Image: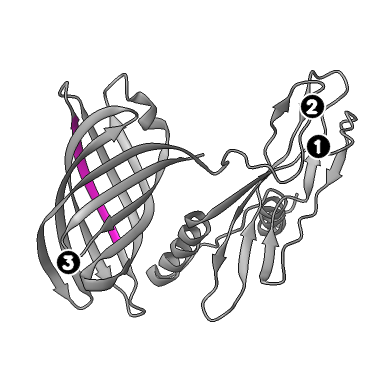
């Protein structure tokens, strides 16, 4: 294959598997905008499960078309799925996940579709419209609550502040307490780009460290809400799963400085 076909092939692969291509950007602003797009796609989700009425175990490719209401401007997703061969045990259900968000100044939304194989026992029945499990966003792995402690101005051009907090809660069902520090930079459009790091300890004295990046927006009375990604590292055997996953997080601070953080596994 000619190297010049690389970008075209990548775009085709992304389109057929329900993704999109983010090109190598030349500026931080463009990269931040790409991150905002990813965050918006992950924020709100509707999940659908569907089983073909006439499941054919022929190993062939079957196209899937999903049509939305008039307010849906665009749907991006896999073109279809390959059915199992007749010698496989059980049926196969493609699972569709749609992340839907409002586009500024337009009464429209964009849906992203992902398909996943799911085994169904022989003779089982399923009707369209049933709710199912998430694909891109997995189980919730952590929830903590705490308090913002210190804020410090690092720069006025661009406006940048450093924030420290302490919190406690659970990660993978294990009780933890921790602390973190992050910097927040206010961008010209009023959004906030943040990146930080932190340390949590279990009651047994085992440590978990994390680094993360997110996009935030201000609320009433000085409240702020972030959405982004976290990456973990730990030597704990019972929490070793954290080393092999990335976490999609919601981090909210109210006007009084109370914090709530929730993290889900991003599959």
Task: Indicate the colouring scheme.
Answer: one colour
Q: Magenta segment range?
A: 194-201
* Between discs 2 and 3, the one toward the N terminus: 2
Magenta stretch holds residue 231: no
Picture quadrant where residue 177 is located: top left
| Residue matched to label 3 | 161
* Between discs 1 and 2, the one toward the N terminus: 1
SS at mark 2?
A: strand
| Residue matched to label 2 | 91
Q: Residue at x 62, y 39 (%)?
A: 132
Left/right of residue 43 with respect to residue 63 in the rendered view:
left
Q: CA distance from mark 1 to mark 2?
A: 12 Å
Magenta span: chief secondary structure: strand
Picture quadrant where residue 240 is located: top left
Instruction: Give the percent coordinates (x, y) of residue 241.
Output: 39, 27
Q: Residue 100, which numbered label?
A: none
Q: Residue at x 88, y 28 (%)?
A: 57
SS at mark 1?
A: strand
| Residue matched to label 1 | 82
Q: Of circles 1 and 2, which is in front?
A: 2
Position above or below: 126 against 96: above
Magenta stretch holds residue 196: yes
Number of residues whose C-alpha sits closer than 10 Å to that of mark 1, classed few (under 14), some (14–19) or many (20 or more): some
For this rendering, which residue is in front, 267 or 140?
Answer: 140
Instruction: Give the percent coordinates (x, y) of residue 248.
Output: 41, 47
Instruction: Give the percent coordinates (x, y) of residue 81.
Output: 78, 41
Q: Residue at x 41, y 70 (%)?
A: 27
Position above or below: 55 against 90: below
Instruction: Give the percent coordinates (x, y) of residue 254.
Output: 23, 61
Position above or below: 227 against 174: below
């Amino acid at each position: 294959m000619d190297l010049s076909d690389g970008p075209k092939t990548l775009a085709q692969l992304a389109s057929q598997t329900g993704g999109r291509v983010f090109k190598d950007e030349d500026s931080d602003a463009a990269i931040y905008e790409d991150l905002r797009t990813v965050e918006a796609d992950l924020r709100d989700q509707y999940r659908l499960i569907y089983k073909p009425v006439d499941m054919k175990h022929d190993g062939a490719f079957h196209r899937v078309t999903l049509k939305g209401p008039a307010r849906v401007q665009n749907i991006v997703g896999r073109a279809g799925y390959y059915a199992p061969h007749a010698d496989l045990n059980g049926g196969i259900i493609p699972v569709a996940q749609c992340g839907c968000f409002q586009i500024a100044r337009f009464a429209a939304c964009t849906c992203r579709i992902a398909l996943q194989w799911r085994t169904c026992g022989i003779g089982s029945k399923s009707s369209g419209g049933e709710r199912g499990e998430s694909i891109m966003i997995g189980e919730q792995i952590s929830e903590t609550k705490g308090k913002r402690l210190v804020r410090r101005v690092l720069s006025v051009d661009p406006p940048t502040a450093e924030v420290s907090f302490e919190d406690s809660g659970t990660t993978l069902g294990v009780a933890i307490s921790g602390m973190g520090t992050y910097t927040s930079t206010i961008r010209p459009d009023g959004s906030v780009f943040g990146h930080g790091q932190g340390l949590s300890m279990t009651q047994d004295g085992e440590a978990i460290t994390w680094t993360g990046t997110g996009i935030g927006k201000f609320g009433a009375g000085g409240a702020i809400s972030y959405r982004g990604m976290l990456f973990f590292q730990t030597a704990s055997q019972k929490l070793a799963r954290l080393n092999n996953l990335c976490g999609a997080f919601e981090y909210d601070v109210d006007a009084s400085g109370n914090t709530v953080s929730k993290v889900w596994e991003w599959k």
